[in-house]
Image (cartoon, helix red, strand yellow):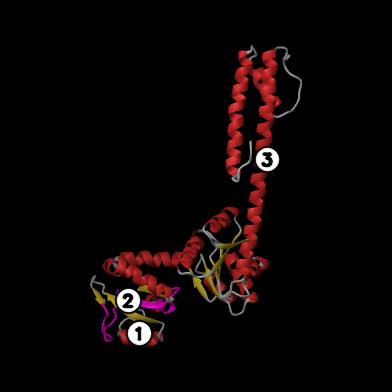
Amino acid sequence: MQLSQSPSRNLVNGLLFLAVLAPVAVCGYMVLGWNFGDALYMVVITIFTVGYEEVRPINTPELRALTLTLIVLGCTGVIYLTGALVQFFTLSQIQQVLGIKRMKNEIDQLRDHVIVCGFGRIGNMLARELKAGKSRFVVLERSDARVAEARALGYLCVQGEATDEAVLKAAGIDRASILATVLPDDAANVFITLSARSLNKSLRIIARGELPTTEGKLLHAGANDVVLPAHIGAERIAELILFQNANALLRGSAQMKGFEHDLHGLGLELETAAAAEGSPFVGLTIADIERRAGGAFLIVALNRRDGSALTRPPAETVVNAGDGVVVIGRSGRVRALDAFGAG
């Protein structure tokens, strides 16, 4: 028996060989008059060369022939299986070491890349979008399973706590342009933001927050932008409920989805905000609102409270309470939109 180039195939072959040999030998001893327990015991101690005293005397030519055959084939099978196991574990370790070293070299060559802290649900989706946009990025994750998943997807990944400055340095934070910390732990995101800002003063930091009260802490810690997934999700649901017709018009077609994707690539987003009663924008014309916004966004459509929709509304169109204002603005939920909901 000779080992092939495939460790897994060698393991399977060795196990199959012993799985066939052992039952055949047990049956052979039973045919020669042994009971099942004695036959199984004899086969096991012979195959694995333990060398304990035989439970029955080997005193006939048939028993001696069977035992000699079992010794030769059993020992050969065990040696083969042992070699396959050594090959499997050694090759796996070598590949892992070489893979980590190659990945480290690739990370060391990166410049102006993105660092994604956390490879949970949001981190996974973010990495997928970055890859689709051909952006260079490094994932930081502590979980063995998630690290294996990230590397299986072909992402550069550093295993460790993102709160550890040594791990951030291993990801090339001094050469990175953006860091996105998207862990579901607000305290960890604040600490990562503080560490990242101290290591790279010019770094743009985008932080995830679970609680609205965390936004101020993250901004104070040095984050440039804060994303509240629960808040955004609630706004999206409200948009679907309040402006069903306009939502179907703006997001329902493949063409509009492609348009949104192109906007995202330019750092822009298409958003809808409801004009609340008492908002400073209610009663103003579109031209007045855009002037007050200082170029933060442009109004491209207006969803009236009665369900009608105005695309490319004239500059003199007045925004009323309850209207949905569709704007194009900078990514990350345009802050000026908050004024539409201020009562």
The magenta stretch is: 311-338
**Callout 2: SS:** strand
Q: Residue at x 45, y 73 (%)?
A: 332
Which disc number belongs to residue 289?
1
Between disc 1 and disc 3, whose residue precedes?
3
Between disc 3 and disc 2, whose residue precedes?
3
State the residue position of label 2: 325
Image quadrant occupied by the N terminus: top right
Between disc 2 and disc 1, whose residue precedes?
1
Callout 1 environment at 10 Å: few (<14), some (14 to 19), or many (20+)?
Answer: many
Q: Residue at x 58, y 36 (%)?
A: 13
Query: What amino acid does circle 1 point to?
Result: Ile
| Percent position of residue 91, x then y | 65, 49
State the residue position of label 3: 83
Q: Is residue 68 above or below residue 98?
A: above
Query: What amino acid does circle 3 point to?
Result: Gly
Q: Is residue 298 magenta?
A: no
Query: What amino acid does circle 2 point to?
Result: Val
